[in-house]
Amino acid sequence: MGDELPRDEFKAIWHSQPTGTSTMTMKLIRSKARDLQAKTRRQLLGTVAAPLAAAFLYAFGIREFPALEHVMHPLFAFTLVWSLVGLYFLNRGMWSTVMPGDAGLSTGLEFCRGEIERRRYLLRRVLLWSLGPVLLAIGTFILVLAMIGTKDRGLFPNGLPFLALVVVWILGYFVMRGREQRELKRELDELNDLEKDNSR
């Protein structure tokens, strides 16, 4: 690891090479396209978590608290349908094809930009179609816990660890989303730099 060149030095050496520049550039583009596609696919697979979480809380709640089925059935059923519809909308048209092997530089760059736009689109839509159903399922579960509590031992303090975990998870979720937004901007900037470098 100690003999790795800093990014600026690597770019300077790369630009000083008289031949093979376009070949190296296309290798970088193909590598970036594969990385972007892998990240998009991982995010799309992650959208399955919302209906799974809703179904798990639904099944657990019905099994553990049968006396409150009249409260849980409509809320959990709505949550499950919402998350399944969201799964459809999040995945519709999002599974891209592989970049053609004979793609030129401009085609390769546009392909990479398209992958970044797919991830941006997914990031914008995931709050409504994935996080929303999960929060409703958790809220329904917390409501049930509050309703089953006796007068002297309600949701607090026994339910406090669960509530704390929910709050930490929600905060962590938004921190991760902010990090993803910054990562997308960085990747777009790298593509723009690469395009500028090769237009000189």
Image: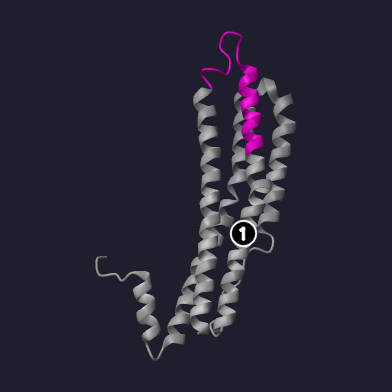
Please say if 198 is above or below 157: below
Q: Is residue 153 magenta?
A: yes
Q: Is residue 122 above or below residue 103?
A: above
Measured from the top left, where is residue 52 in percent x and y? Answer: 60, 43
Q: Residue at x 52, y 67 (%)?
A: 189
Q: Does residue 163 appear left or right of residue 121 in this picture?
A: left
Identify which residue is drawn at 61% across, 26% down. 142
The boundaries of the magenta stretch are: 135-159
- Please give the residue where the numbered disc 1 appears in the rendered image: 120
Question: Relative to the observer, which residue lies in front, 77 or 4?
Answer: 4
For this orientation, the residue located farthest to the top is: 152
**On the rendered structure, is 7 left or right of 1?**
right
Q: Measuring from the top left, give residue 84's x and y in whole percent.
A: 69, 48
Rendered image quadrant of residue 109: bottom right
User: Residue at point 52% right, 72% down?
Assistant: 191
In the image as oriented, which residue stretches furthest toward the front?
200
**Where is residue 23 drawn, in percent x and y?**
45, 86
Sort mark 1 into few (<14), some (14-19) or many (20+) by Cα contacts within 10 Å: some
User: Closer to the camera, 21 or 55?
Assistant: 21
Tag 1: amino acid: Arg
Near-viewer residue (143 or 115) = 115
- Which residue is located at x 56 percent, y 61 percent? 40
Quick one: which residue is furthest to the bottom in this view? Answer: 19
Q: How many marks?
A: 1
Q: At which x and y percent is residue 5?
A: 31, 71
